[in-house]
Amino acid sequence: MRAFLVAFAAVCVFGFNIQVIAPLAARDLLNGAEEYAGLIVSSHTLGSLLGAVLVARADRHLRGCYAGGSVLLGLGLIAFVIPSNAMETMILVCSLIAGVGRGLTLTASSTMASTWGESTVFRERLIALTSIIFTASNLVSAGIISMSLALGSSTLTLWVCGAGSVAAGLCAMMMRSKWDSENRSEPSGP
């Protein structure tokens, strides 16, 4: 359970603040075209919905959806800053890709928390912990975003958030066997 919670916390901190980053990305990467901020968030939301639908169809591959989604979310954020002749289209596509990753990650983690172990009390505790982590992660990610913006533009922020999400996904891939063994035996402590 602890391995899952650590990976979940990392992806929440680094990957789930597109609403904060979108107006800054529009300003910095599209030469002040703030009107694209709503399109970026909408594209990301559509991608999240697609990711959630994919998880619903994934059957027993939740851990793979979670880990792969975290990596996809990070790569989508990093790809925002790749120069392109069609920058507006590129950013919307990257936002969609990051959204699919977010939908995969968030839906898989919620489903895993609600189905993990035999005990209802254990599952309820895990769901409560993921809710606390999801909410509290905003405190940490706000600081990270503020510091990276103070050091540079939204480009640095997108790199930091993307790299953190990729790292969380890679760690989740490496911890899959630990998650499987934890799922077979519920810990007695918090």
Image (cartoon, rainbow, N blue to C red):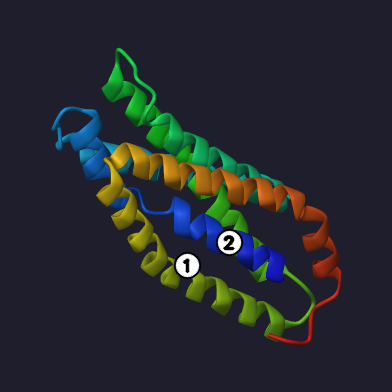
Query: Which quadrant of the structure image shows residue 146?
Result: bottom left
State the mark number for residue 58: none
Residue at image point 42% right, 71% down = 135
Q: Are marks 1 and 2 in contact (CB under 8 Å)?
A: yes
Which residue bears the numbered disc 1?
134
As measured in the structure, the alpha-carbon distance from the residue carrying label 1 to the one carrying label 2 is 8 Å
Which residue bears the numbered disc 2?
8
On the rendered structure, is 61 left or right of 13?
A: right
Query: Mark 1 or 2 closer to N-term?
Result: 2
Does 182 sit above or below residue 66?
below
Using a 10 Å C-alpha cutoff, classify the residue at mark 1 as few (fewer than 14 neighbours), some (14 to 19) or many (20 or more): some
Residue at image point 39% right, 60% down = 141
Name the amino acid, label 1: Phe
Using a 10 Å C-alpha cutoff, classify the residue at mark 2 as few (fewer than 14 neighbours), some (14 to 19) or many (20 or more): many
Name the amino acid, label 2: Phe
Residue at image point 46% right, 59% down = 13
Q: Nearer the viewer, residue 155 or 61?
A: 155
Q: Secondary structure at mark 2?
A: helix
Q: Could you say where residue 129 lies in the image, as x and y percent from the top left?
A: 57, 77
Q: Could you say where residue 12 lies in the image, as x and y percent from the top left?
A: 49, 59
Residue at image point 53% right, 48% down = 165
Q: Nearer the viewer, residue 111 or 160?
A: 160
Does 132 sit above or below residue 154?
below
Query: Which quadrant of the structure image shows residue 36?
Result: top left
Total marks drawn? 2
